[in-house]
Image (tube, grey):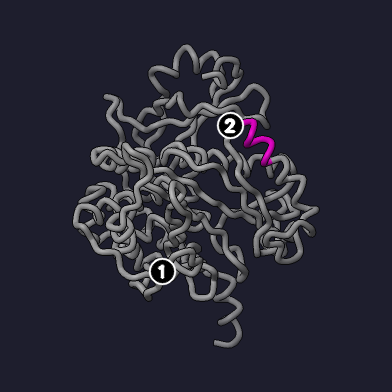
Amino acid sequence: MTALADAAEVVLALPDLYGRLQGTRLAGDFFRSQVAEVGYGACDYLLSADVEMRAAAGYRGDYGDFVLRPDLGTARPLPWRERTALVLADAVDVSGAPIPVAPRQILRTQLERLAARGLTALVGTELEFLVFSESYREAFEGEYRGLRTASRFNTDYALTGLGELDDLVGALLRNMTEAGLRVESARGEVHPGQYEIVFRYGEAMEACDGHVFYKTGAKQIAERAGRAITFMPKFDSGEGNSCHVHFSLHGADGPVFEEHFLAGVLACAPAFTLLCAPTINAFKRLSPDAFAPTAAAWGTDDRTRAVRVIGTGASRRFEHRIAGGDANPYLVVAGIVAAGLYGLEHELPLPPAGGDGVPLPRTLESAAAEWRGSAVARGAFGDEVVEHLASAADAELTAFAAVTTDWERQRGFERL
């Protein structure tokens, strides 16, 4: 609450289906006196709109109302805006009942199922992004072509060649630390202009809340610096932007490594790929020789697998490597928990490490079909959530089908 006490402005924000923060700016005194306890009305299309904010996923009579109920425990200052705080909200109906398809509620439901078994989940996300020398305005006006990356070559683990990145990365690190996120590491990555900042792991919901705060804040900080960054999984033919999720279970007596749980994560990975790859672009990253997994296989400290088991003792955990930079962290983690619980409930055996594994879907269309047809998904999430997320994929596919791409023109204008 400290962040709210003196805030002149409060941003009340709801994570949408894509993990983006959507919401409204409120005067601080108005928030404290009128909104903090009862919430603030908003249009329900915030949970049924596509990337272009077109209502398309068919949620319960679009353009009705629901309430943004502040979760005051999520309040953080926005150090890059004077006397401003951000508070995450849960979507509830006018009676106060949670909206089932809201991403935070989807995750909360799975975490409650986990808690019923006396278990909690600790999560840490690793999110990569590309930095460009141009501003967002310049990138837009140039139709996102001819952009200059802020480093000129592979700077993976490099300590030189990062001069054009240092100012922005420094601002990101300072501001996120001031906002209360605990930074663990920051380094250059493989693609020119690529960087990764890693934050300390935490309770699953808290980690996802920090993830969406960081992603939104990073874009705002970049814009103020006259730079552009992107988290899209596959900007070009180079290495993509991933979102690796480190996951561990804890019981009453401490860390628990459950092979049945991991077996469930692998068994459900093909059907749950949609939760990790919600866009057409995401599947450009999930391809052979692209430093991303293509099958539901695991290994011990093996970065070629969908899941790698790492650490020893209390730090033993697995790293889930399917999601790209466009993934909604609440949905990714909810999928991991639901799949793991399926493995526990059915005592699934863990296949040997290093096997080929069942192939993951190669397209958004096939991922949506597997998700929609999954009895495990319907049992864990319910028909409403399954159909809502599948409909969002349908909307993405419909939008793409209506566009003629540069590739098609270059390939067919003259030669076909």
Quadrant where the image shows the C terminus: bottom right
Q: Which residues are magenta?
A: 172-179
Viewer-side residue, 258 vs 335? 258
Amino acid of disc 2: Gly
Instruction: Determine if the magenta segment contains residue 256.
Output: no
Against 47, residue 160 (above or below) is below
Evaluate whether residue 221 shows in this view: yes
Amino acid of disc 1: Thr
Residue 322 at x, y = what percent? 44, 61
Residue 363 is labelled as 1
Choose the circle earlier in sequence order: 1 or 2. Answer: 2
The residue under the point 62% across, 30% down is 78
Residue 180 is labelled as 2
Residue 232, quarter of picture: bottom right
Against 119, residue 353 (above or below) is below
Instruction: Determine if the magenta segment contains residue 174.
Output: yes
Numbered disc 2: secondary structure? loop
Q: CA distance from mark 1 to mark 2?
A: 38 Å
